Each structure stands twice: as C-alpha cells, then as structure tokens.
Image (cartoon, helix red, strand yellow):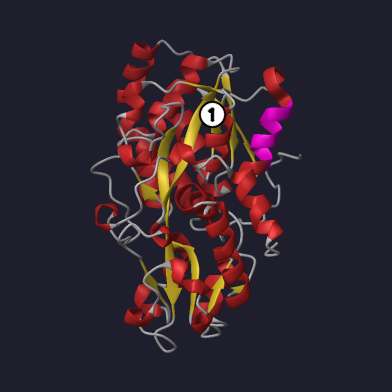
Amino acid sequence: MNFAKGTPRATRLPPLTRLGLLAALAAALVSALAPAFADGAAQAGSSTNVTLTVYSGQHESLGEALAAAFEAETGIKVAVRSGKDANLANQLLEEGARSQADVFITEEPGQLAALDEKGLLAPVDPATLAQVDQRLNPDSGDWVAYAARSRVIFYNPSLISEDELPKSILDLTDPAWKGKFAYAPSGAFVSTVTYLITSIGKERTRAWLEGIKANGVNLQKNGAVRDAVEAGQIAFGLSNHYYWYLLAEKQGGPDKLASKVHFMGDGDAGALLLSSGAAVLKTSTHQAEAQRFLAWLTDPQGGQQIIATTTPQYPLAPGVESTMGLKPLSELSPPDVDQGSLGGVDEARDLIIATGII
C-alpha cells in the first residue's frame, strides 16, 4: 500500500479547516504550552533525537495537525503514514516484527481491538488512560480513546418530523420504512454490525441486514447520505454526527441547512458512540516517546485542544468541550459497550457481504 501523503481515501472528509488555520492553532498551542511539555520531557525521560512513525487511519488533515503540534511542542519528530484503518491494520500484521510503526491511531475502534486480541499492542500508561472518558477506553487498557463519533439520523423536516422517526434502528426492517431512508455500508456501519452481533446475535443481525437491504437506499458513502437528505431526495439517513456538523460549518451554521440531526437515545444501537483510538506497538523501538505521544494526545491542554477546535469529533478529556456546537457528550445516551469488544470487524464485513449489501 502506498502511504504517500496524497494517498486517496474512500471516506475522506471535505477539508474542515484550512492548513493555515491548523498551523495557526498548533502554533498558538505551542506558544502557550511548550514550557509544560518541556518539563514533561524531562520527567518522562524521552528523547527528542528520534522520529516516531505513526500509522494514521484518521482524516488526513487531523492526523497531520496532531503530528505537527506534538512535534512543535516536544521536539520529537513525527512521520505520518495515512490510510484506511483496515489497510493499515493489515499492513501491521504483514510487517510483524519488522514493522517500523511506533503508534497506530484510528477512526474506528474495531481494528485496534482486533490487533489487541492478537497481542500486538503495548499496555498504555494508566495515567494516560485516566485522562479521558472511561466509557470510551477498552477494558484491556492496551489502547486509549482520544476522540469519538456518535451514530445519528439525519432527517429532512419537510419530509418527516422528528417525532415520526424510528425509535430504534432495529425497527427499520418493517416494510413501512421501505424507500424512506438511506445508509452507507462502511466505517461506522461495520462497527454497528459488529456491535449487533455481540449484543443480539449473528442470526438476528443477519435478519436486520436483510431488512436494511430490502427497505433502505444504499448510497455507499456517508457524505452522499447527508447530501441526499439535505436536498430532500430522501426523508432520513443513518450516518455519523460529524458529517452534518461539517456541512453546517461550511454553510455558515446549522440554521443554514434544510436538514437536521437527530441523536437517538435509550441505549439504542443507533446511538452507538465509537472511539477513535491510539496504541503503541509492542515492536516499537521508541516506547517512551510513543507513550508520550499518547499522553499528549489525551492531555486536556495538548491534543484534546486540537480535536476540540479543528474537527467536529468529540474530545474526550473531561472539561474539554468542542467549539463546533456539538450536542454535549454528557447528554448522549449510547449503549453501554466495551469498545474493546468490537474487534470482530472481519465477521461483520463478511456478514454484510453475505447479505448482498456490498
């Protein structure tokens, strides 16, 4: 796989922030926080004479912004290799002990959970794990959550009112919903299927997928789902919250959009909250520096500020709030799930394929 900076990505977001803004934000954080991180370097015993290789499944602009800010604040150089979560995880498996990767950061929890099950990840410093919302960390403690996305419904009020929306995504197998909703069978959809397999069983999940295929409109990509709902081409769609907030920012605010976002509740699978995670590879030859990157990434005054101000993903350090107008994390009602239990992504993808969705 080509990890060049310009590698095309099937789910790449439209640019949320310009490179100049990212650089300015990073520079501002560096100026304010450099003394504290300099002290941290001495305490951690890490060296600035190394280059960390970070495999990043995150949106490229965010991955590059995080790397640039960390490097500027600590003096530790970072080389980012961008790609999709699944491709990078497979690359790590193929490389094995020969891998030059020090850190793996993802959009979804599934690939990290799968690598963790294979024993490839080093335990995360407990102090790092303690810096973020504990609901989003895996029980194993071998990787740490640094951001999150919520599954939601986008809807067009001219076609359907909020109180008419399904109370559960499991209800979408009812023929009454035929042709009224759209979905994209990638990314977080796969994580949702993984969660359903673990919570309601494989056969019930298969039946749900068959119902989704029969009743829904497969638009392949989350951005296409959002845009179809916004244009009034379909009443509602299943997606991730940040696609809607991205469009709202681009258009000048939520009040500029025809569509709205609905956060499901009561622990429904449609309200699934998914971690973006970070891990240190056991094979890394820069363990101290890699652990320091994770500590910085989850620090309220470090990487969490980049996430809060440059992307509509949720920062996870208590007290750090997004500046993108998101519904507060504390007001969401996701199902209670160990993010580390979502490693069955291959099984989920195989089931999606078997039902003819992809």
Residue shown at 56% from the left, 22% from the top: 119
Q: Secondary structure at mark 1?
A: helix
Where the C terminus falls, by quadrant? Answer: bottom right
Q: Which residues are magenta?
A: 87-94
Residue 340 within the segment the image draws in magenta: no
Q: Taking 21 as reference, is 140 above or below it? A: above
- Residue beneath the point at 36% across and 71% down: 167
Q: Quadrant of residue 116?
A: top right
Residue drawn at point x = 45 percent, y = 13 percent: 46
Q: Residue furthest bottom?
A: 158
Rendering coords of residue 115 (x, y %): 58, 31
Residue 327 percent coordinates (x, y): 30, 61
Residue 123 appears in the picture as rendered:
yes
Main secondary structure found in the magenta portion: helix
Q: Is residue 93 magenta?
A: yes
Which amino acid, by three-letter code, is at mark 1?
Answer: Asp
Count of marks placed on residues: 1
For image coordinates 71% across by 47% down, the residue present is 7
- As rendered, which of 17 and 196 lies closer to the eye? 196
Residue 84 visible to the viewer: no
Residue 268 in the image: x percent, y percent? 37, 60
Q: Residues within 10 Å of mark 1 (few under 14, many from 20)?
A: many
Residue named by callout 1: 116
